[in-house]
Amino acid sequence: MAKATTNVPVEKNQYIELDITGQGHEGEGIGRYEGFAVFVPGAIRGERVKAKIVKVQKSFAYGRLLEVLEASHHRTEPLCPVYHRCGGCHLQHMSYEGQLEHKQQMVADALQRIGKFAVRLESAPGGEEGDAIPVYPTLGMQDPWRYRNKSQVPVGWVDGRIVAGFYAPRTHEIIDMEGCPIQHPYSDEIVSRVKRILGDLRISPYDEATRKGLVRHIVARVGFHTDETMVVLVTNGRKIPHIDELVSRLRDEIPHLVSIIQNVNAAVTNVIFGPDTITLWGKDTIEDRIGDIRFSISARSFFQVNPIQTGVLYQKALEYAGLTGDETVIDAYCGIGTISLFLAQKAKRVVGVEVVADAIEDAKKNAALNGIENVEFLVGQAEKVIPELYAKRGLRADVVVVDPPRKGCDEALLQTIVDMQPKRVVYVSCNPSTLARDLRYLEDRGYQTQQVQPVDMFPHTFHVECVVSMSLKL
Ligand code: SAH
């Protein structure tokens, strides 16, 4: 028997029954078939399922979920009718409570497996003391729907009709969509009205195959706390026919509109925005807030997509920073300065460092908008700028906050933290694996990991964010 001579107990097209004992970082169920790992997207920890093996690798296989034989109590009906085709969400088949538990578990697993930490899953903040590091229950949303403030949808033709929605997986075929339950309701309304207005005025959508036609993407941005909305039309050329009528109908029909923007992108590319941005009507920006800090957001500027949970995350970072008003704080990977401005309210001085020059320009404008003067923003790689500030300008920080991209912190930055010896390090992370690696580096060089708080920034997706407090060992 072939199966007996190899270590791989499954083969393609085989039907198996499997107990799902774990959950992978993309939310897929994981079970062991005769000890061999099988990933089954759509299956939930605790379930027994029937699956068909679709792909076999050396040390694991993929199975397609055929039937749930014993369902988890977290299994639920996805709210979105196109959940299985869209690919934007990954966990809608799991109750929200189940998603939050899963995310807490993901963080704990990474700290254990990669960071070699002893952790304990806490059921509520402030549990009993002990040597193991507490990983708190994920802070979720009261209402985990309609949380996104930016929608970017491709526009096209299907059978002579204008459609806008999402690309079918692995293709550029646009699936028309009525609405998206994780988008702010205004965004859905903007997309559907723009679609109709374009149709009425016979303004053509862009066709990727022939490179003819005008409108490539509709982008809607919403200020959650201000109710201001912006429409961006990304076009293949500068001239828009019937422009006056277009603007007047958009103004009449779109709720809370304060800004109509055109962005010209004539390149053959998957990148949404092109180089030229023109304000067709109204303001160049909309405004929103995170906590008490105001932000001015232009068509292309980066802004956290879930402003409610961003506030929750940064409030935790502020708490972990333990500021009294006397501290110098470094905010590494500061983006548009959200965390820096948040902390500046309670610190003596904050220095933010970020590699994208446009983001630093936005950060400076946002500081001015809020009248915050005790912050300084510097462009450059954190791992170059901060060691230089330390060695050449003698900068010493009491608290260092890092919020790196998925790949985590560069070792040169971590080493500078160790040399600089801030009292506290606050690590904001979007990737538990690199978080665990970096915490271990600091832990072995004088820091102690104290509290780990997962925060759900992107309900129904597999993304896991968390904030961690570390302090210098005495
Ligand atoms: N704290 C930010 C967001 C952080 S996202 C906010 O509140 O808006 C991670 C940021 O790190 C991105 O803005 C990215 O441009 C930046 N970045 C990536 N690599 C970097 C590096 N080597 N040095 C400094 N910034 C970097």
Image (cartoon, rainbow, N blue to C red):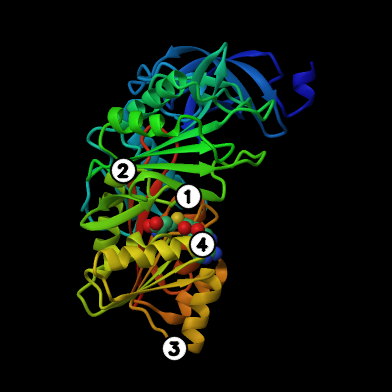
The kind of residue tagged 4 is: Val
Density class for disc 1 (Cα within 10 Å; few <14, some 14-19, many ≥20) is: many
Does the beta carbon at disc 4 come under 8 Å from ligand 1? yes
Give the x, y percent position of residue 82. 45, 18
- Distance between the alpha carbons at the discs numbered 1 and 4: 20 Å
The kind of residue tagged 1 is: Asn
Q: Is residue 13 above or below residue 278?
A: above
Q: Disc 4 on helix, strand or loop? A: loop
Q: Which residue has dot 1 on it?
A: 431
The foreground one among 271 and 384 is: 271
- Distance between the alpha carbons at the discs numbered 1 and 3: 31 Å
N-terminal of the pair, mark 1 or mark 3, is 3
Give the x, y percent position of residue 384. 55, 74
At horizontal 56% and vertical 68% (from top left) the residue drawn is: 411
N-terminal of the pair, mark 3 or mark 4, is 4
Q: Disc 3 on helix, strand or loop? A: loop
Q: Are marks 2 and 1 in contact (CB under 8 Å)?
A: no
- Distance between the alpha carbons at the discs numbered 2 and 3: 38 Å
Does the beta carbon at disc 2 come under 8 Å from ligand 1? no
Q: Which residue has dot 3 on it?
A: 394
- Distance between the alpha carbons at the discs numbered 3 and 4: 24 Å
Q: Which residue has dot 2 on it?
A: 138
